[in-house]
C-alpha cells in the first residue's frame, strides 16, 4: 500500500507542471495538488499501465476564474478534432470534445455530470480512434477519486 502510494506520488509529480507547489495528498489511485501561479487545485490520476509522462485524468478548480470541477484528459494517443472520444463511468456515458492528445467535457453541465459519476463508480474508461484509425482505451481505477476531488476543492477554498 505504501509502495503504491509513493509510486503514485512520483508519477503524479512527473505528470504535473513544474509550477506545482503543494501536494494535498495521495488517495489510493488519485492524488491532489495545489499551484500558486496561476492559483488552481486539482485531482489527478494515470490510467492503468500508463507511462509516468503519459496520459492522465484531472479534475481542476481555478478559483480566480470561478471554475470548479473542470474535467480534462490527456489521452494515450493523439486524435483528430473530429474524433469521437467516449468516456464511460460505471453505466454513464459522455461524448468528450477532443483535439490532439487532449479531451474535455463539452460544457459545465457535462463536467458536473462527470464529477458526480466519478463519485459513485469504481472504474472509468476513455475510448477513441487515434489519428491512424486504431481504437484505443485508457482504463482508470477510481479508488480515491472522490477524496482527491474533495481535497482539491478544500485546497483552493478562499483563494478566489
Image (cartoon, rainbow, N blue to C red):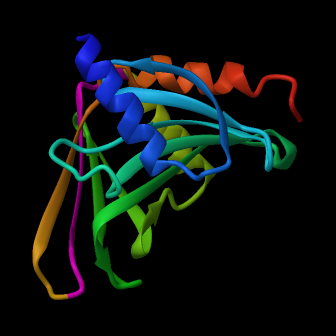
Q: Residue at x 14, y 85 (%)?
A: 133
Q: Is residue 126 magenta?
A: yes
- Residue 93 appears anywhere in the view: yes
Q: Is residue 50 magenta?
A: no
Q: Provide the residue span drawn in magenta.
A: 120-131
Does 110 sit left or right of 35 as displayed? left
Left/right of residue 101 with respect to residue 20 in the rendered view: left
Number of callouts: 0
Q: Quadrant of residue 122?
A: top left
Quarter the C terminus occupies: top right
Q: Is 115 on the left or on the right of 156, as rendered?
A: left
> Where residue 27 sits: x, y (%)?
40, 18
Nearer-the-camera pick, 94 or 66: 66
**Farthest residue, direction top:** 1
Q: Is residue 68 visible?
A: no
Q: Identify the image quadrant of residue 130.
A: bottom left
Q: Position of residue 71 (x, y in %)?
A: 51, 48
Q: Nearer the viewer, residue 36 or 94?
A: 36
Percent position of residue 126, x then y: 26, 54
Give the residue drawn at x 80%, y 39%. 63
Q: Name the residue furthest bottom.
A: 132
Q: Is residue 67 above or below residue 104?
A: above
Q: Quadrant of the N terminus?
A: top left
State whether residue 41 is above or below residue 135. above
Tell me where residue 39 appears, x and y as whole percent. Answer: 79, 42
Q: Nearer the viewer, residue 57 or 113?
A: 57
Is 130 left or right of 81, judged from the image as shown?
Answer: left
Amino acid at each position: 500500500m505504501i509502495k503504491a502510494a509513493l509510486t503514485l506520488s512520483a508519477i503524479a509529480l512527473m505528470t504535473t507542471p513544474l509550477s506545482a507547489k503543494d501536494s494535498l495528498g495521495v488517495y489510493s489511485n488519485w492524488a491532489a495538488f495545489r499551484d500558486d501561479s496561476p492559483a488552481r487545485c486539482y485531482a489527478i490520476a494515470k490510467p492503468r499501465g500508463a507511462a509516468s509522462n503519459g496520459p492522465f485524468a484531472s479534475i481542476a478548480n481555478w478559483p480566480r476564474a470561478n471554475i470548479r470541477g473542470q474535467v480534462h484528459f490527456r489521452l494515450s494517443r493523439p486524435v483528430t478534432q473530429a474524433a469521437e472520444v467516449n468516456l464511460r463511468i460505471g453505466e454513464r456515458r459522455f461524448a468528450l470534445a477532443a483535439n490532439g492528445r487532449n479531451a474535455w467535457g463539452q460544457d459545465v453541465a457535462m463536467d458536473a455530470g462527470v464529477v458526480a459519476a466519478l463519485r459513485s463508480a469504481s472504474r472509468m474508461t476513455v475510448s477513441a480512434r487515434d489519428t491512424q484509425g486504431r481504437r484505443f482505451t485508457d482504463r482508470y481505477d477510481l479508488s480515491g477519486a472522490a477524496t482527491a476531488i474533495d481535497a482539491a476543492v478544500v485546497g483552493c477554498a478562499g483563494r478566489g
